[in-house]
């Protein structure tokens, strides 16, 4: 082969390698609203996403004060993910500052939500992730959004989503089996706020709480008195603290009812990376293990 042809082939080969490298190395800039959602997005997006998360680990996703850099991150994001259903009430303030930002993807779209009356208003319970089955719907919505933003890596996202849903199905099955091993009369728990409605409906546990679905709500003296009466009538024997909000009120109610401490749950925020709930799957396993142990002990 002539030197000229060799040079041409070398240039073409180099160009093909560079093109292939560029295509495979594409990374989407993604913003997520809170730590649990960030973990799920990272499981689907893998090495093809760079996630900027807003409400950090151990943070309260209801009560967040946006920072200027949040608006910049959202403005520059290829995709922004919210859970939705009223969880991130603060997000509208950021979007006003993030001019030109793409509309966020609401991952809870398609989930059958719980609606109920709270202080005379219809409220949607936003804590959908406490039912592992709902997070499979999250995964489908996340996969669809990532594929739309990066079609070249569609097969990669789809495989990750499929693999992760296998893990989530196993998690869901495991929770059901563990709850089934507890006395039905003991499946009653007091928590700080009403964050476990989806868990309770999916897995057959009654949760009572002094605060509603948002930690920003307030309980009246009558609400607290009624709750104390209900706890006594239902023979609720155990209470749990929550990692991301104030525990003083639930401790006061527990003292008035004789409920015993069961530990600290993670209803809406991951722990630190070296903690017991560093990922969504670990969070669900940890919460379930604590509750199951408490229910077995109180049922004896």
Image (cartoon, grey):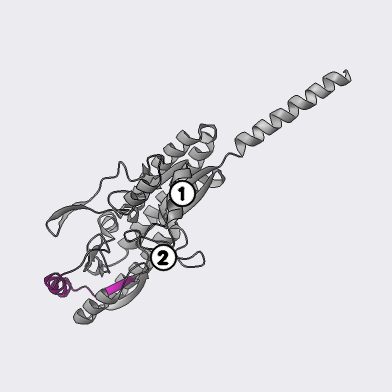
Along the line of sight, the residue nearer the viewer: 296 or 251: 251
Q: Quadrant of residue 54?
A: bottom left
Using the numbered discs, state the Cα–Cα distance from disc 1 to disc 2 in whole angstroms: 23 Å
| Residue depicted at x 42% and y 50% | 71
Q: Which residue is tagged 1?
A: 72
* Coordinates of residue 155 in the picture (x, y in percent): 52, 35
Q: Which residue is tagged 2?
A: 58
State whether residue 163 appears in this view.
no
| Residue depicted at x 40% and y 49% | 169
| Residue depicted at x 37% and y 65% | 266
Classify mark 2: residues with Cα within 10 Å, few (<14), some (14-19) or many (20+).
some
Q: Comparing marks 1 and 2, which lies closer to the viewer?
A: 1
* Coordinates of residue 272 in the picture (x, y in percent): 48, 65
State whether residue 79 appears in this view.
yes
| Residue depicted at x 56% and y 42% | 27
- The total of numbered circles placed on residues is 2
Secondary structure beneath label 1: helix
Classify mark 1: residues with Cα within 10 Å, few (<14), some (14-19) or many (20+).
some
Secondary structure beneath label 2: loop
Can you tell which mark lies on residue 228? none
Along the line of sight, the residue nearer the viewer: 91 or 233: 91
Q: Quadrant of residue 292?
A: bottom left
Boundaries of the magenta span: 220-241
Q: Is residue 192 magenta?
A: no
Q: Is residue 238 magenta?
A: yes
Main SS class of the magenta portion in the image: helix
């Amino acid at each position: 082969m002539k030197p000229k042809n060799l040079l041409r082939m070398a240039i073409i080969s180099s160009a093909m390698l560079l093109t292939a490298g560029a295509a495979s190395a594409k990374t989407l800039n993604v913003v997520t609203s809170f730590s649990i959602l960030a973990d799920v997005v990272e499981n689907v997006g893998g090495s093809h996403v760079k996630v900027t998360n807003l409400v950090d680990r151990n943070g309260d996703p209801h009560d967040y004060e946006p920072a200027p850099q949040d608006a910049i991150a959202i403005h520059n994001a290829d995709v922004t993910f919210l859970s939705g259903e009223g969880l991130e009430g603060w997000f509208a303030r950021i979007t006003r500052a993030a001019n030109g930002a793409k509309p966020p993807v609401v991952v809870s779209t398609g989930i059958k939500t719980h609606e109920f009356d709270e202080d005379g208003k219809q409220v949607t319970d936003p804590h959908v992730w406490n039912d592992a089955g709902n997070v499979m719907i999250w995964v489908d919505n996340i996969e669809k959004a990532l594929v739309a933003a990066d079609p070249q890596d569609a097969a990669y996202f789809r495989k990750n989503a499929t693999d992760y849903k296998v893990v989530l199905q196993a998690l869901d099955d495991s929770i059901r089996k563990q709850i089934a091993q507890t006395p039905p009369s003991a499946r009653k728990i007091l928590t700080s706020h009403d964050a476990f409605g989806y868990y309770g409906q999916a897995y057959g546990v009654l949760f009572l709480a002094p605060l509603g679905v948002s930690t920003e709500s307030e309980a009246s003296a009558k609400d607290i008195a009624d709750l104390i009466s209900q706890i006594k009538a239902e023979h609720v024997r155990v209470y749990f603290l929550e990692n991301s909000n104030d525990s003083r009120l639930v401790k006061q109610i527990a003292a008035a009812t004789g409920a015993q401490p069961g530990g600290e749950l993670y209803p809406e925020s991951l722990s630190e990376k070296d903690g017991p709930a560093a990922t969504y799957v670990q969070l669900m396993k940890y919460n379930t293990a604590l509750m199951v142990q408490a229910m077995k002990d109180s049922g004896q």
